[in-house]
Amino acid sequence: MKFPYMQMFCLIFIFFPTVISAADVFPGSTLYASNPQNSWDSPNGTFSLSFIQEAENIYFAAIIYNGIPVWKAGGDPRSAVNSSAALRFLADGNLQLVYTSTGFVVWQSNTAGRGVSRGTLDNSGNFILSNGSGPVWTTFDNPTDTILPGQNFTVDQVLRSGLYSFHLLRSGNMTLRWNDTIVYYSSTGINGSLANSSLTSPSLGLQQPVGIFSLFDPTLSNPLIMARSSDYGEVTDDSIRFVKLESDGNLRTYSSARNSGSGNKIVRWTAISDQCQVFGYCGNMGICSYDDDFNPVCGCPSENFDPIDPKDPRKGCKRKVEIADCSARAMLSLNHSTLLTYPPETSSQVHSASITACKSLCLSDNLCLGSTSLADGTGVCYLKLSEFISGYQSPTLTSTSYVKSKT
Ligand SMILES: *[C@@H]1O[C@H](CO)[C@@H](O)[C@H](O)[C@H]1NC(C)=O
Ligand SMILES: *[C@@H]1O[C@H](CO)[C@@H](O)[C@H](O)[C@H]1NC(C)=O
Ligand SMILES: *[C@@H]1O[C@H](CO)[C@@H](O)[C@H](O)[C@H]1NC(C)=O
Ligand SMILES: *[C@@H]1O[C@H](CO)[C@@H](O)[C@H](O)[C@H]1NC(C)=O
Ligand SMILES: *[C@@H]1O[C@H](CO)[C@@H](O)[C@H](O)[C@H]1NC(C)=O
Ligand SMILES: *[C@@H]1O[C@H](CO)[C@@H](O)[C@H](O)[C@H]1NC(C)=O
Ligand SMILES: *[C@@H]1O[C@H](CO)[C@@H](O)[C@H](O)[C@H]1NC(C)=O
Ligand SMILES: *[C@@H]1O[C@H](CO)[C@@H](O)[C@H](O)[C@H]1NC(C)=O
Ligand SMILES: *[C@@H]1O[C@H](CO)[C@@H](O)[C@H](O)[C@H]1NC(C)=O
């Protein structure tokens, strides 16, 4: 019995001073990217607000759990900064991400002149700016790409990662969008049809420890289940769960144990199991397929196209010769492929046409850049009139697509 007692004694002895020093932060405090060791910590040290380096001379001011950013000042990639940036809690109550060299403001909380007198990172990972009468601004109300347990995600909020965004509609429908317009995923959860009644103020929350992503509303006696984590109900003491919109356009729930090593997280649910169905994953004119290890890979339609950035296949492809410049145009055929079509694109671009007609319809239409003949028994042909084309090739697809090209 003596040894455990000693251990506990040591823990208290070591951590007690930290609890005291990790108190609130006050106007006048600053964090510097050049010194990422400096941080504003939650009382029990689970979360910290500090700079995190993600690549050479690329930093974010972020709230971090176990080496994982769960909130980024200004969002990603918009507010990536270099080592001469600082996060300043100004005397007027504003929190600013600035370049110290030029004074350029990258992002700010816009809380000047509201009597803000302290900042607190609580044990649930919420950073709160408050004045004498209470909270004025919180990171939970201004999320970037992550929802933590205890965070209330409402219809007025949005998660963003690059061109991708996640929204909750008043109907209780949750959607993923590309460039704010193309809805490539929507779900009302596993008891979804119930949500079409008249919800008054729906919100999403991740229930910890059980691991259920739920829809709450005053009109519902029980929350609706949007998604269960694969390990739902399996309580693991030191794990934290979170929902994250990743830069690949997919929404996932994760669990991450504090002692599992920095950055370590386990996927517990993925909104779109087929990554190639994520609109724009391979960029414009990029074709998504899977390699032998089931990883999504991005390629170009043919040798008539070049990758925009050979180092990053996800950036998409461009024609070696622009269509306008080529005297002889032709349709390049891509077997077992589809050009992804999601609302609102489809409205006037659906035709009934045979496979040959599907090809020639597009060839003769100046605005058409590609077409897909479904060949699934419906006789449907999609014409792509939009500037942006996102392709998917797989042996399991019966459809054939055509891309306008030079002969
Ligand atoms: C960081 O970027 C700012 C603004 O672009 C620039 O003024 C500064 O020189 C850069 N510093 C470093 C270390 O790259
Ligand atoms: C404190 O914040 C609240 C909410 O933003 C605001 O209504 C109030 O006026 C603020 N108090 C002062 C002293 O600025
Ligand atoms: C820190 O506080 C949170 C919230 O109260 C709790 O869930 C977590 O277990 C605590 N972590 C530690 C290491 O005490
Ligand atoms: C979430 O926030 C909204 C708006 O502030 C509120 O109406 C709702 O009751 C909250 N939901 C939960 C589950 O706390
Ligand atoms: C959810 O939203 C999508 C996209 O707006 C829509 O197509 C779908 O019909 C909606 N589902 C329900 C049940 O409202
Ligand atoms: C996103 O939409 C805006 C306007 O809605 C448009 O100007 C822009 O070109 C679009 N981005 C891409 C990559 O297509
Ligand atoms: C949602 O479905 C689950 C089981 O699939 C059920 O236990 C729960 O009661 C349902 N919620 C409502 C509000 O009906
Ligand atoms: C929700 O809408 C669907 C289809 O519109 C309908 O079948 C279902 O009965 C509705 N559910 C409720 C609870 O109103
Ligand atoms: C596409 O399929 C057709 C018919 O099965 C075949 O003749 C043609 O060679 C295929 N093209 C390519 C590029 O694989």
Image (cartoon, rainbow, N blue to C red):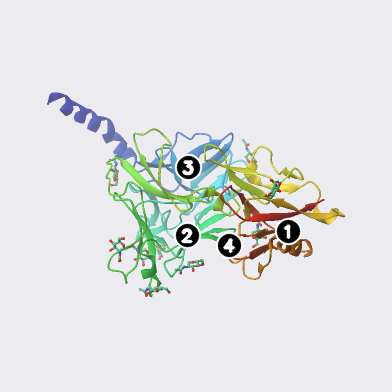
Disc 3 or disc 1, which is closer to the eye? 1
Please tell me whether mark 2 or mark 3 is closer to you in this view: 3
Label 4 packing within 10 angstroms: few (<14), some (14-19), many (20+): some
Check disc 4 and report the residue beneath it. 342
Q: Residue furthest left?
A: 1
Residue displayed at 23% across by 28% down? 10
Frontmost residue, 173 versus 40: 173
Which image quarter has ligand 7?
A: bottom left
Up-down relation of residue 70 to residue 184 (above or below): above
The residue indicated by pointer 1 is 369
Whether the residues at callouts 1 and 2 have beta carbons within 8 Å, the answer is no
Which element type, helix, strand or loop, lies under badge 3? Answer: strand
Quick check: 109 left or right of 337? left
Does 405 sit left or right of 282 as displayed? right
Q: Which mark is residue 73?
A: none
Q: Quadrant of the N terminus?
A: top left
Answer with mark 3 or mark 1, whichever residue precedes in sequence: 3
Is the residue marked by circle 2 packed among few (<14), some (14-19), or many (20+) residues within 10 Å? few
Where does residue 248 sit, x and y in percent of width and height? Answer: 54, 47
Q: Percent from the top left, x then y, of residue 203?
A: 39, 63
Q: Identify the residue under disc 3.
A: 30
**Disc 4 to disc 1, how far (Cα)?**
16 Å
Q: Which residue is mark 2?
A: 113
Marks 4/1 in contact by CB < 8 Å: the verdict is no
Image-based side of 306 in relation to 287, left or right: right
